[in-house]
Image (cartoon, coloured by chain):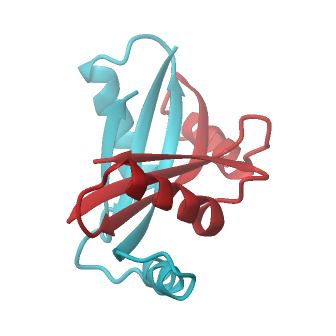
Chain colours: A red, B cyan
Amino acid sequence: MARVVVDVMLKPEILDPQGEAITGACGRLGFAGINGVRQGKRFEVDVEGEPDEERLEEIRNMAGTLLANPVIEDFEVRVE
Amino acid sequence: MARVVVDVMLKPEILDPQGEAITGACGRLGFAGINGVRQGKRFEVDVEGEPDEERLEEIRNMAGTLLANPVIEDFEVRVE
């Protein structure tokens, strides 16, 4: 069994109010030197068998359908 | 400026209903060979200066305070 990780982040041009709230909280709580935070999602997918290119293409397909909204989010699939 | 990534995942012993819902949906939508999915969060933190060990320790401190709930979540900090 292999573990494939799918990282989903808002596209850079999409506003991220959660990330901005965290950035603001860092300043107020005294964590200095933090210029910005963006929040996204991480999925750990346990797949059967070897994660070859064909299998990864299936996972990319699944990620674009189920895990991410490709209109506003980018995603990246990698074996871990 | 450096980018530090903080991955936050539920501890393995904590139930993840969102992940289970996704696993179920994979089956129903015909994405075969997926044994399990766990959902977590990914934060991209833009920090000033070089991310040396001292800086990373500050980020770990911030992550444990602001980004993760250490009672139910594990987190990992890495430079990307």
* Residue A12 at x, y percent in the picture: 72, 35
Residue drawn at 37 percent across, 65 percent down: A45
The residue at 47%/87% (across/down) is: B24
Quarter of the N terminus of chain A within the rendering? bottom left
- Establish if B74 lies above or below B37: above
Residue, x 50% and y 85% (percent of image)? B21
Residue A10 in the image: x percent, y percent? 68, 46
| Pick the front one: B21 or B52 | B21
Residue nearer the viewer, B68 or B33: B33
When the figure is inspected, residue B53 is found, relative to residue B16, above or below; the finding is above
Where residue B76 appears, as percent x and y from the top left, is 30, 46
Q: Position of residue A17 (x, y in %)?
A: 74, 49
Identify whether A28 is placed above or below A8.
above
Res. B69 in view: no
Looking at this view, is B7 or A6 the one in front?
Answer: A6
Numbered marks: total = 0
Q: Closer to the camera, A52 or A34?
A: A52
Query: Looking at the image, can residue A8 be seen?
Result: yes
